[in-house]
Amino acid sequence: DTEVTQTPKHLVMGMTNKKSLKCEQHMGHRAMYWYKQKAKKPPELMFVYSYEKLSINESVPSRFSPECPNSSLLNLHLHALQPEDSALYLCASRGRGGPVNEQFFGPGTRLTVL
Amino acid sequence: AQKVTQAQTEISVVEKEDVTLDCVYETRDTTYYLFWYKQPPSGELVFLIRRNSFDEQNEISGRYSWNFQKSTSSFNFTITASQVVDSAVYFCALSSTYNTDKLIFGTGTRLQVFP
């Protein structure tokens, strides 16, 4: 199973809402990533979890709160977002140890903040 | 500093034409990795290839081929006999062996293949 799944596929939320994005992989990967991608731009790294611990936070505003409950799951909790946070949010995973491996990406969640 | 440049913003071809997507990178690292990803309209980034800086051999996979030239810091991607299904945005990316979690992406090239 070489698949990263993300739910929901689409999400519309108001600026006062609290919502969560979910990512799951069953490839035994121990590194998981959140990216944000605006239209016609490359993905931008937000967070990296390595062995379920947050290892990289690319100075992301605190209204985005990541969580890694176990080695297969990655969540992104959203609160008090702004309209400019509307984007495609991509999750990725990668194996640890051995030679460098590529990141496998999920299909993304298209988020619209009203 | 690390940087990836994909100078071609958009390319349009007719089916069965060959097309080459250019990628030029900058890095001070002596060892690094280069990647190509495809992003169809559905949004998912699909991994195509990883190349170690030690390995300058060109690679062919079906209709896809990659030309890695360290002397010119380029890692170009050629699609032979393009098909409509090749229509997508293609990203070239670079990572250092010292920080393999960070992918430095180019701005992408949008390829449109018309029937």
Image (cartoon, coloured by chain):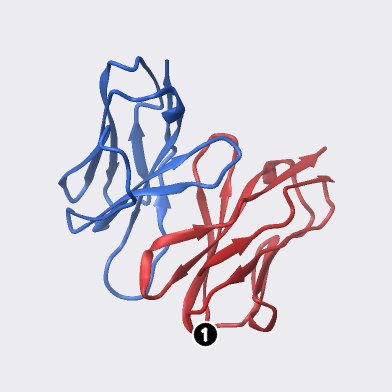
Looking at the rendered structure, the number of numbered marks drawn on it comes to 1
Badge 1 is on which residue?
B54
- Return the x and y of residue A74 as percentages of the image width and height: 24, 42
Q: Residue at coordinates 51% horizontally, 79% vertically from top-left?
A: B28
Residue A109 in percent (x, y) is at: 41, 31
Q: Residues within 10 Å of mark 1 (few under 14, many from 20)?
A: few
Q: Identify which residue is drawn at 26% across, 49% down.
A: A26
In the orientation shown, which residue stands out farthest toward the left? A69
Q: Chain of mark 1?
A: B
Q: Is residue A43 above or below residue B2?
A: above
Query: Residue A96 occupies which quadrant of the picture?
Result: bottom left
Q: Quadrant of the C terminus of chain B?
A: top right
The chain coloured red is: B
Q: Which of the two residues, A18 or B54, is positioned nearer the viewer here?
A: A18
Q: Give percent across and percent down for residue A43.
A: 48, 46
Q: Is residue A10 above or below residue B28?
A: above
**Amino acid type, residue under disc 1 in the picture:** Phe
Residue B65 against residue B70 in the figure, above or below: above
Q: Is residue B1 left or right of residue A61?
A: right
Shade representing chain A:
blue
Query: Where residue B102 sits: x, y (%)?
Result: 40, 61
Q: Residue at x 72, y 48 (%)?
A: B9
Q: Secondary structure at mark 1?
A: loop
Residue drawn at the location 22% of the way across and 43% of the way down = A73
Query: Where is residue A51, by image quadrant?
Result: bottom left
* B56 to the left or right of A77: right
A13 relative to A37, above or below = above
